[in-house]
Amino acid sequence: MKYIPLLISILLFTACNSSTEQNQSEERPNVKVAEMNTENYTLIHTVYFWYKEDLSEENIEIFKKAVKKLGTVPSIGKFHNGPPAPTEARGVVDNSYDMALNVFFKDVAAQKAYQVDPIHLAFVEQCEIFWEKVIVYDNMIR
């Protein structure tokens, strides 16, 4: 008799988890890492830039061209850049930035090589006058 509340709790927990898993799988497909073609990469370097408030359109274009040139650094595996996506406003989404980079590296050594590459160093030297703020997130792909 004293185990009945415990059994009821276990049954409720199991039912809730099964329902949650079913709803999540209906909302988005289960994508495996291998299907995302990331098997050759282990590190993602994500950079967010906020332009200076008074940055001219001409300087924004200079910045965009310099960003594209970053993608030619030899140690980079994959390179993507762009503005915030026009997704719905939600409390957990920060789309206050102006430009983001997603840079894929095969390992930490490749990311270190990128940091000292002349193309990257020239980008920082040429473009740091254009941004108010920059934040970098590096994460490992597991």
Image (cartoon, rainbow, N blue to C red):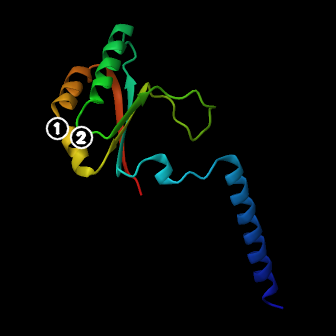
CA distance for labels 2 and 1: 11 Å
What residue occupies the far right of the structure in this picture? Answer: 1
Q: Is residue 142 left or right of residue 63?
A: right
Image location of residue 111, percent across then percent down? 25, 44
Res 43 label = none
When asked about the image quadrant of residue 135, the answer is top left
When asked about the image quadrant of residue 2, the answer is bottom right
**Which is nearer the eye, 138 or 69?**
69
Please say whether residue 100 is visible from this viewpoint.
Answer: no
What residue occupies the far bottom of the structure in this picture? Answer: 1
Total number of numbered labels? Answer: 2
Residue drawn at 48 percent across, 47 percent down: 36
**Is 18 above or below relative to 126?**
below
Which label's residue is closer to the chain start, 2 or 1? 2
Amino acid type at mark 1: Val
**Viewer-nearest of labels 2 and 1?**
2
Amino acid type at mark 2: Ser
Res 116 label = 1
- The 10 Å Cα crowd at callout 2, few under 14, some 14 to 19, many 20 or more, is some
Q: Is residue 2 left or right of residue 76?
A: right
Residue position for label 2? 75
Dot 2: element? loop
Residue drawn at 28 percent across, 28 percent down: 70
**Is 138 above or below relative to 100?**
below
**Is 55 above or below relative to 85?**
above
Residue drawn at 22 percent across, 31 percent down: 120
